[in-house]
Image (cartoon, rainbow, N blue to C red):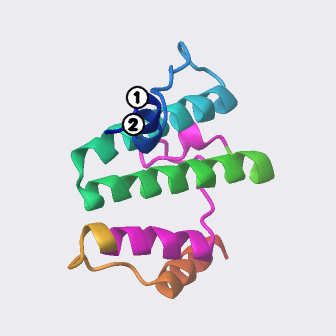
């Protein structure tokens, strides 16, 4: 039988407390990381591998947001389709490949966008 400590570790650690009303992109990133840790902890308890794989997508999104904020000063909280005219998140080829790998695991029959096609279309828009 597992001890309480072993069970908590197996479930991805203790539940994280989300910050109260994060405002800045840096505070929002910390809240996103805590939410992802909580999701992972709860997803493991479902015993459904593909459901757990969503944590990889969530964490990759967080890494992309963090990199864009630090390297390009892009406020990722304003980069959705609902914020036209704002800068877009820059996604590197290896990040898109990782996202595609996760999506292939979760949805094996999903038709994915080819990496080269995505970068070609993006470069055509920015040229």
Circle 1/circle 2 CB separation < 8 Å: yes
The residue carrying mark 2 is: 7
Q: Which residues are magenta?
A: 75-104
Task: State left or right for residue 51 relative to residue 71.
Answer: left
Residue 93 drawn at (x, y percent): 60, 76
Q: Position of residue 21 (x, y in %)?
A: 53, 14
Residue 16: % across, % down: 50, 25
The residue lying toward the viewer, choosing from 96 and 54, is: 54
User: Spatial distance from mark 1 to mark 2, Cα to Cα?
Assistant: 5 Å
User: How many tags in the picture?
Assistant: 2
Residue 63 vs residue 78, the one in the foreground: 63
Q: Is residue 91 magenta?
A: yes
Asked if residue 63 lies left or right of residue 80, the reply is right
Other-residue count near label 1 (Cα within 10 Å), few / some / many at <14 / 14–19 / ≥20: few
Tell me the quadrant of the picture where the C terminus can be found.
Answer: bottom right
Q: Is residue 87 visible?
A: no
**Would you identify the image quadrant in which residue 110 lies?**
bottom left
Viewer-nearest residue: 34 or 3: 3
Q: Residue furthest top?
A: 20
């Amino acid at each position: 039988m597992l001890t309480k400590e072993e069970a908590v570790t197996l479930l991805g650690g203790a539940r994280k407390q989300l910050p109260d009303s994060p405002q800045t992109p840096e505070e929002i990133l910390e809240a996103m990381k805590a939410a992802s840790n909580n999701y992972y902890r709860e997803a493991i308890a479902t015993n459904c591998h593909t459901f757990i794989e969503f944590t990889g997508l969530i964490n990759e999104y967080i890494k992309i947001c963090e990199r864009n904020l630090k390297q390009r000063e892009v406020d990722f909280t304003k980069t959705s389709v609902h914020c036209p005219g704002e800068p877009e998140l820059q996604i590197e080829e290896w990040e898109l490949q990782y996202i595609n790998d996760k999506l292939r695991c979760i949805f094996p029959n999903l038709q994915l966008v080819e990496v080269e096609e995505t970068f070609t279309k993006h470069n055509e828009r920015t040229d």
